[in-house]
């Protein structure tokens, strides 16, 4: 995967100034961090801004041809004045063809930054992919998105991979009609189509996402539509070029429960119709249980558990996953108060060298003070990074 050389940029990042306490930095420390940041981000930006990069630098092959995406040791860092925020720190998981992979975890654990890395939409130059690969099979070629130049990425984004955001109010432009905005996406990726063909396809898409009176809605502005309809328009835009992968980042959080269920149903059906895969990001384990074939649990920029949905729900191994499950309301089970996981996610600037969940973990023992735990295989597909999984206990 990573052909990491001695003295490489990644090694340099690891030796950068590490503030002991990012809340109390002297002006001198801040200046030093800013200088080091500029050196690293300039080097990365210069590499990214090169013109005419040969395809051999960014085309690759999938490890398993049944996957559409393979995250392999992805590290995405933000070089801020108070230190390096390791938002995504060595994340590996796969998205199999035609399947839905749910990514779950508390706020700030790196779910969105993982998906934004795949879209090359991380806020640059502050945010950078510093290591690892994101292999993406678009059907005709396999790209390593971490190495792909942005001019090439502009053709992939929107046509081969598209994103549905949480808040349709801010994602749709209020001064253009819904139809105009869908037309724009189709036109951009299909320049050979005539304006009449583009309009016909937009109306077909509005129909497809279950909106009656598609021709009328084509001419409406976002403020004339309800929240659920706006989210359907976003889905129509995202699916208009039949992408291989749909990223849905909290697609239903802003909607009421009935509309939520309808939108999830719609996404599931459309995914099968256009033969696509879904990366579904959410806080809501209920949504994951209903939609996902595979589950990835993230904590503080790392994957702590992953497996098929049945494995993770029936036999959760990592205490963090167990805590997330216990904090979810269950029908027919009455409790006085819902469980909450004690404590907070550690400061991403000064991550400890031991298990990141240790200070909140009720299962911790002396062994947990050791190095960050290795991944343990419970089955071929079920993996957890913890010293006290059932498989790890058996080995002792
Ligand atoms: N532009 C940025 N500058 C600095 N840090 C950032 C930036 N964007 C994200 N981060 C940091 O990266 C970490 C991961 O953020 P991310 O948005 O991926 O979390 P998330 O899991 O999607 O959370 P949520 O559930 O709240 O959406 C957080 O610690 C966040 O503060
Ligand atoms: S390694 Fe130890 S502290 Fe970390 S989650 Fe497992 S039991 Fe808890
Ligand atoms: Mg997010």
Image: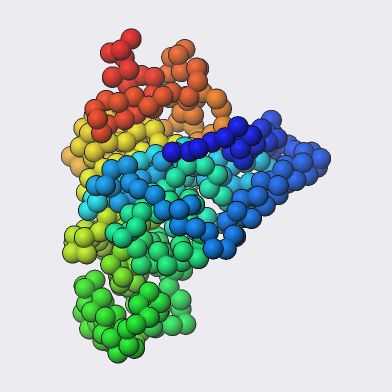
Residue 202 picture quarter: bottom left
Q: Is residue 13 left or right of residue 175?
A: right
Q: Nearer the viewer, residue 40 or 348?
A: 40
Q: How is the image coloured?
A: rainbow
**Residue furthest bottom in the image:** 196
Q: Position of residue 386 (x, y in %)?
A: 39, 24
Q: Nearer the viewer, residue 247 or 9?
A: 9
Residue 169 picture quarter: bottom left
Q: Position of residue 227 (x, y in %)?
A: 35, 69
Residue visible at 46% across and 18% down in the picture: 368
Residue 318 picture quarter: top left
Residue visible at 47% across and 42% down in the picture: 132
Q: Quadrant location of the C terminus?
A: top left
Q: Position of residue 143 (x, y in %)?
A: 40, 54
**Residue furthest top in the image:** 396
Figure label count: 0
Q: Quadrant location of the N terminus?
A: top left
Residue 296 appearing in the image: yes
Residue 80 appearing in the image: no
Residue visible at 34% across and 57% down in the picture: 141
Q: Is residue 259 left or right of residue 43?
A: left
Residue visible at 47% across and 12% down in the picture: 366
Q: Is residue 32 left or right of residue 167?
A: right
Q: Is residue 285 left or right of residue 88?
A: left
Q: Is residue 265 above or below residue 316?
A: below
Q: Is residue 154 above or below residue 308?
A: below
Q: Position of residue 165 (x, y in %)?
A: 40, 61
**Residue furthest right in the image:** 28
Q: Nearer the viewer, residue 323 or 156?
A: 156
């Amino acid at each position: 995967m990573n052909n990491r050389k001695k003295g490489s940029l990644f090694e340099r990042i690891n030796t950068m100034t590490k503030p002991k306490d990012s809340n109390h930095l002297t002006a001198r420390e801040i200046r030093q961090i800013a200088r080091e940041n500029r050196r690293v981000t300039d080097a990365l930006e210069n590499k990214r801004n090169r013109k005419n990069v040969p395809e051999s630098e960014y085309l690759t092959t999938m490890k398993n041809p049944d996957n559409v995406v393979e995250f392999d040791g992805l590290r995405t860092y933000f070089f801020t004045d108070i230190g390096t925020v390791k938002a995504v720190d060595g994340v590996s998981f796969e998205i199999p063809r035609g399947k839905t992979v749910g990514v779950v975890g508390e706020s700030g654990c790196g779910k969105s930054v993982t998906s934004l890395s795949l879209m090359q939409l991380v806020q640059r130059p502050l945010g950078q992919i510093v290591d690892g690969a994101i292999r993406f099979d678009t059907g005709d070629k396999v790209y390593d998105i971490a190495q792909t130049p942005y001019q090439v990425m502009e053709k992939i984004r929107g046509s081969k991979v598209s994103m549905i955001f949480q808040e349709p109010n801010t994602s749709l432009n209020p001064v253009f009609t819904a139809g105009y905005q869908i037309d724009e996406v189709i036109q951009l990726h299909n320049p050979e189509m005539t304006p009449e063909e583009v309009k016909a396809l937009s109306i077909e898409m509005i129909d497809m996402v279950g909106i009656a009176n598609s021709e009328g809605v084509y001419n409406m502005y976002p403020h004339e539509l309800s929240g659920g309809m706006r989210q359907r328009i976003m889905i129509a835009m995202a699916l208009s070029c039949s992408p291989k992968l749909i990223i849905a980042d909290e697609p239903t959080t802003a909607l009421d429960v009935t509309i939520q269920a309808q939108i999830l149903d719609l996404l599931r059906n459309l995914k099968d119709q256009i033969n696509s895969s879904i990366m579904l990001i959410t806080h809501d384990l209920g949504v994951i249980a209903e939609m996902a074939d595979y589950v990835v649990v993230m904590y503080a920029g790392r994957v702590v558990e992953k497996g098929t949905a049945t494995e993770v729900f029936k036999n959760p191994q990592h205490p963090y996953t167990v805590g997330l499950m216990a904090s979810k309301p269950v029908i027919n089970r009455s409790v006085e108060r819902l469980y909450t996981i004690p404590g907070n996610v550690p400061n991403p600037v000064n991550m400890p060298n031991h298990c990141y969940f240790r200070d909140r973990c009720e299962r911790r023992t002396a062994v947990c003070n050791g190095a960050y735990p290795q991944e343990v295989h419970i089955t071929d597909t079920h993996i957890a990074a913890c010293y006290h999984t059932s498989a790890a206990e058996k080995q002792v």
